[in-house]
Image: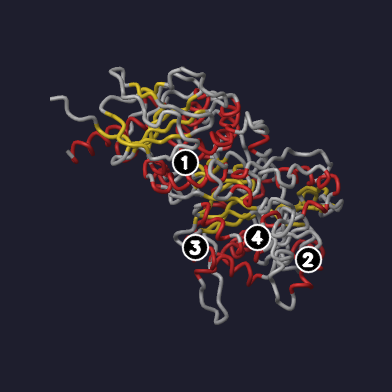
Amino acid sequence: MLMQHRAVMRSLAIAAATCITACPSLAQTPPEQPAPEHTVIRTADAAPWSNSPLADDILYQVMPIAWRDSDHDPADAAPEARARAEADLFRDGDFRGMTAAIPYLSTLGVTGLWSTPIFPSPAYHGYQHTEADRVNLALGAESQFLDFNRAAHAANLRVFIDLVAYGINRDSDLCRDASANPASPFAGFIAIKDAATGTPFGYDYRTCTGTTVSFAFFDLRNTGARDLVTRWSLKWLEPRDQLGNPDRAAAVDGYRLDHVWARYPDGPDGWGYNIETFWKPWKQALRAVRPDVITFAEQAKWETYGTDLHPAHDATFAKPFLFAAREAIRASNAAALHTAVESAIAAILASPAADAPTRTFLVTLGDHDVDRLASALNATTPRTAPRLKAAAGVLLTQPFPPVIYFGDELGMLGVAGRFGSDANDIPRREPFKWSAADSFPMTNYLARHAEASARRYSKDHDGKSVEEQLNVKGSLLETYRSLITLRRETPALRRGGYRALESSDPRVWACLRATTDQSVLVAVRLSTAPTPPGAAPPAITLPPELTIDRELTISDPAATIPTITPITAARAAHIDLEPGQTRVFLLMAAPPTH
């Protein structure tokens, strides 16, 4: 019977990875490729993303300044505590706060953290930073960052940090010396737009405090510039202890890379900023020191899946999926959601990487560059709030490694402002709500900009805080926790193939996720409208030879019908779902009929 079950599961795994033809919109069309339904997929290739080193991960993105403050800890009796607090008027997040937040990440159940840049920068968000071999002292000392890494690894969390590899702040020591000193060891490192005037190639913008940030591109055709960025990257992969020995526990596990091009479209040879001459040698140098290093790249062209970056990187972001899934959830359109998933699968199958099966997409429904998920879904009232639970269900049961943007698990709100500076994005990045009321350990960094502060979305006692949701049955945070646990404990959700299933209700997203040894049915009700009294639950059609064994989820809220209607001759399982609810069932091979 075991052999028969495995044989059935193997055939289903193949079927699960063979999807209906995707019909993505123009904004999310991947490179032309054979329709998935016409693609012959061998058993070993049923879910090519399952071989990714990120396949089992659930990552969590933070912005340090907005994450958690430690300087105002009333329990801190250290002699320097008062001085730190007095010097930090805005309760900025810091490295010690990141360390203090590790128990929360463990409670949430994520496997790793991605932090926006930790390097010196005049911008609150950390981008357009200076030399990346040093930390931003406003966040704490380098030793405190290394302590955070050690604590994270002790809690079985991986650490990834953001890096801007293509340029540097013009006020940096390096850029100043390269510009003013003909004998500088950095001469030739900066891309020059106008040789006659020595004007660097780059751009300027205003910060939330009204100052101007000037950024210059590196000329990565220059061997010295390439080597410099590589040395910076290697430092955090192999930090040294006081005796000069490698301290692997204090190292990062890899990098998220900002604004990556396969070939930069401006300047001579794209200023050397391309896959073949920069990214591939850079990655090889990192792997020589850390063979297990992971790099994931934010493709500069958001309308694509970034597969042209896969020859050098382990993952890119499924940006087209982010926007398509948001709209599908907001409109309760399961068909559009299936199309979004199938478009991503088609793109990964067509990845140009030589070792494509190790490449994957990271799926986000929110990040620091887009409006908050709750705002984008218009989930701002009790009637529309179930969309947030539906989004959690989709994010944590779709095929690719998910990334949770800090605060989305609480339903935090935020839409870009129009302040004429980089403060425009502050509403999307408001301080994480640890407490019901604005107080330690919450940061107050946005007070730097009076208008953004006055118009903040977060309110005291608005229900969108850890204090108000942790261990509260039915809360959004508890929904995330239970779904994260489910994904971590269910191989088919992490590494399985995908097959869209037909539902009698077009507002129910149903799919089969299967490995050779396990098959599960996922059903997510996207609709916020309750089922009319007396109406039959949606019918979901299962493939032949499968039947439901048992439910893996704990219904939240409890289903009005505690059991499902027996599967009919038409292979239909009638599954009761509340608005926004996700239910996942373990499937088994049907018993022999003779």
Read off the residue under disc 1: 400
Read off the residue under disc 4: 225
Q: Nearer the viewer, residue 101 or 319?
A: 101
Q: Residues within 10 Å of mark 4 (few under 14, many from 20)?
A: many
Vertical placement of residue 420 versus 574, above or below = below
Q: Residues within 10 Å of mark 2 (few under 14, many from 20)?
A: some
Residue at image point 56% right, 65% down: 149
Mark 2 or mark 4, which is nearer the start of the sequence?
2
Residue at image point 55% right, 79% down: 244
Amino acid type, mark 1: Phe
Which labelled disc corresponds to residue 487? none
Vertical placement of residue 543 versus 363, above or below = above
| Mark 4 vs mark 1, CA separation in Å | 35 Å
Mark 3 or mark 4, which is nearer the start of the sequence?
3
Which labelled disc corresponds to residue 177? 2
**Which mark lies nearer to you, 2 or 1?**
1
Q: Nearer the viewer, residue 33 or 372?
A: 372
Residue at image point 81% right, 67% down: 87
Read off the residue under disc 3: 155
From the viewer's perspective, is 153 left or right of 539? right
- Whether the residues at callouts 4 and 1 have beta carbons within 8 Å, the answer is no
From the viewer's perspective, is 306 left or right of 200? left
- Whether the residues at callouts 4 and 2 have beta carbons within 8 Å, the answer is no
Amino acid type, mark 4: Ala
In the picture, the quarter occupied by the N terminus is top left
Q: Nearer the viewer, residue 409 or 344?
A: 409
Amino acid type, mark 2: Asp
Vertical placement of residue 106 versus 385, above or below = below
Residue 403 appears anywhere in the view: no
Q: Residues within 10 Å of mark 1 (few under 14, many from 20)?
A: many
Residue 179 appears anywhere in the view: yes
**Which mark lies nearer to you, 2 or 3?**
3
